[in-house]
Image (cartoon, grey):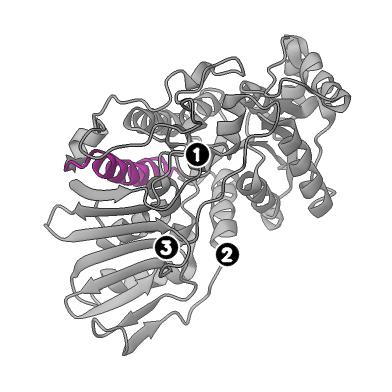
């Protein structure tokens, strides 16, 4: 098998790793062996594969392995496009869960097609954790469902409307197969936030008239290109900085509070207009450094989303809700949600006195419980719609146009053409100019749909 390599020059240790991880798994016979020994067995063991071994993916694997109270769980395969991430994730998880990690060298997969071998390795009844950059979520989800695996997929779930439609279709197929699908909108699984939203839905602050989603903090980081690194490897390693990989800051960083506001409103927006730009950022990437999106709900009320990542500016991370007889502060970034009887948010009328939880752990507990007890559990549609809210906002902001939900959902604009068959010889969808600068959206000129 030809090795896909992101660096022009490699060390002997890297070559040795590649021999261990790619040469042996080329035969169908070995893949069959891996699958057969990774099936869920009569001891109620659930075996897990992690695809995407960065910090969030490794964290998801730790959460999956921490569901031990329900029954035994074991990590049996790792996959990533970068070998150092596979090795780093393995070490962290072995240190934390020495009895639950069984990932020998022949189940450490590297490359753009590594996800298929990891999915194959867990076999029927296994769980696949998808933690790669969002551009790869649709094909990875499709393959996992096709092969009959339960799935946890981290946000965001797609970067464009065609990707959203693929995710929705995969979710429908999963339902037909009785597969369980969980999505990484962990705020929905916060017990304190669930209690707060229940209060709002029961009329504690009256009818919701405005919702505000914020993510305001310092600059998003950027890793300079390493010597010998290919252009594609550089972009993938900086996926938060390139729109084709993460769908924009508004989508990938604000998705939780966009979703929380839609949950509070119990509706999805019908249109959006907005603005944004790149005022102080000078890193060679595609990021706007400020975003503002005004969404309209079916009843005419508004959701206003603001995102900014600049130094020396006002910061806030959370959501604020105004009702006809009160207000609330809640969402991602707000540990203790609170309700008030006025708009000034000075006279508190409710705070959570019930149980609290770690929502990251809770979402995995619910998934594994559903698998073991064969309970309904398919969060695909809600997750796909939350992603479309962010995509709709990005379309409106980058184009400077008002865009409807229907227009966004039916858009054929693909940000990452050819992502399904990508390898290290693939040209990335965007390239730098002679000065090293990448194309940046221009409102009034950029096409939204």
**Region rendered in magenta:** 378-402
Question: Image height check: is 297 above or below 414?
Answer: below
- Residue 38, position as x, y percentages in the image: 74, 30
Q: Distance between the residues labelled 2 and 3?
A: 23 Å
Membership of 382 in magenta stretch: yes
Which residue, given by chain and number where applicable, does mark 2 sit on? 358
Give the camera-side residue of 20 and 283: 283
Q: In this view, does 288 lie above or below 209?
A: above
Q: What element carries label 2?
A: loop
Reading the image, the residue beneath label 3 is 216
Residue 278 position, x and y percent, is 37, 48
**In this picture, residue 417 sits left or right of residue 204:** right
372 up-or-down from 331: above or below: above
Helix, strand or loop status at disc 3: strand
Task: Give the quadrant of residue 188.
Answer: bottom left
Q: Residue tagged by mark 1?
A: 284
Q: Which residue occupies the foreground of this view, 122 or 55?
A: 55
User: Which is nearer the N-term, disc 1 or disc 2?
Assistant: 1
Please name the predominant secondary structure of the magenta segment in the image: helix
């Amino acid at each position: 098998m030809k090795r896909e390599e992101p660096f022009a020059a490699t060390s002997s240790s890297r070559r040795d790793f590649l021999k261990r991880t790619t040469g042996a798994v080329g035969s169908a016979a070995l893949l069959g062996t891996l699958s057969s020994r990774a099936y869920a067995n009569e001891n109620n063991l659930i075996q897990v594969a992690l695809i995407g071994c960065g910090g969030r993916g490794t964290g998801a694997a730790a959460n999956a392995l921490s569901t031990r109270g329900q029954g035994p769980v074991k990590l049996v395969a790792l996959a990533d496009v970068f070998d150092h991430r596979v090795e780093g994730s393995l070490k962290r998880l072995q240190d934390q869960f020495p009895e639950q990690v069984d990932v020998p060298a022949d189940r450490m997969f590297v490359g753009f097609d590594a996800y298929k071998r990891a999915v194959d390795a867990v076999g029927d009844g296994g769980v696949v954790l998808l933690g790669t950059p969002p551009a790869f979520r649709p094909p990875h989800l499709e393959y996992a469902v096709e092969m009959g695996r339960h799935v946890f997929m981290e946000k965001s779930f797609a970067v464009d409307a065609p990707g959203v439609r693929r995710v929705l279709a995969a979710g429908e197929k999963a339902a037909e197969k009785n597969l369980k699908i969980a999505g990484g909108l962990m705020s929905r699984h916060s017990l304190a936030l669930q209690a707060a939203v229940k209060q709002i839905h029961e009329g504690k602050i009256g009818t919701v008239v405005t919702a505000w989603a914020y993510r305001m903090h310092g600059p998003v980081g950027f890793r300079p290109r390493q010597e010998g690194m290919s252009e594609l490897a550089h972009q993938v390693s900086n996926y938060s900085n390139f729109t084709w990989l993460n769908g924009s800051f508004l989508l990938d960083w604000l998705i939780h509070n966009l979703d929380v506001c839609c949950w509070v409103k119990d509706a999805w927006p019908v249109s959006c207009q907005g603005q944004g730009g790149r005022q102080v950022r000078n890193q060679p990437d595609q990021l706007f450094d400020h975003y503002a999106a005004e969404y309209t709900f079916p009843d005419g009320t508004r959701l206003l989303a603001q995102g900014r990542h600049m130094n020396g500016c006002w910061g806030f991370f959370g959501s604020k809700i105004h009702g006809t007889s009160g207000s609330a502060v809640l969402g991602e970034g707000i540990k203790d949600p609170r309700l008030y009887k006025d708009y000034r948010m000075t006279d508190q009328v409710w705070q959570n006195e019930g149980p609290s939880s770690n929502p990251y752990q809770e979402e995995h507990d619910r998934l594994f419980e559903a698998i073991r007890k064969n309970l309904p559990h398919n969060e695909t549609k809600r997750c796909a719609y939350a992603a479309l809210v962010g995509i709709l906002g990005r379309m409106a902001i980058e184009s400077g146009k008002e865009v409807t939900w229907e227009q966004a959902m039916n858009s054929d604009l693909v940000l990452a053409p050819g992502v399904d068959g990508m390898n290290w010889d693939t040209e990335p969808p965007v390239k730098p100019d002679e000065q090293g600068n990448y194309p940046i959206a221009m409102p009034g000129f950029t096409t939204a749909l």
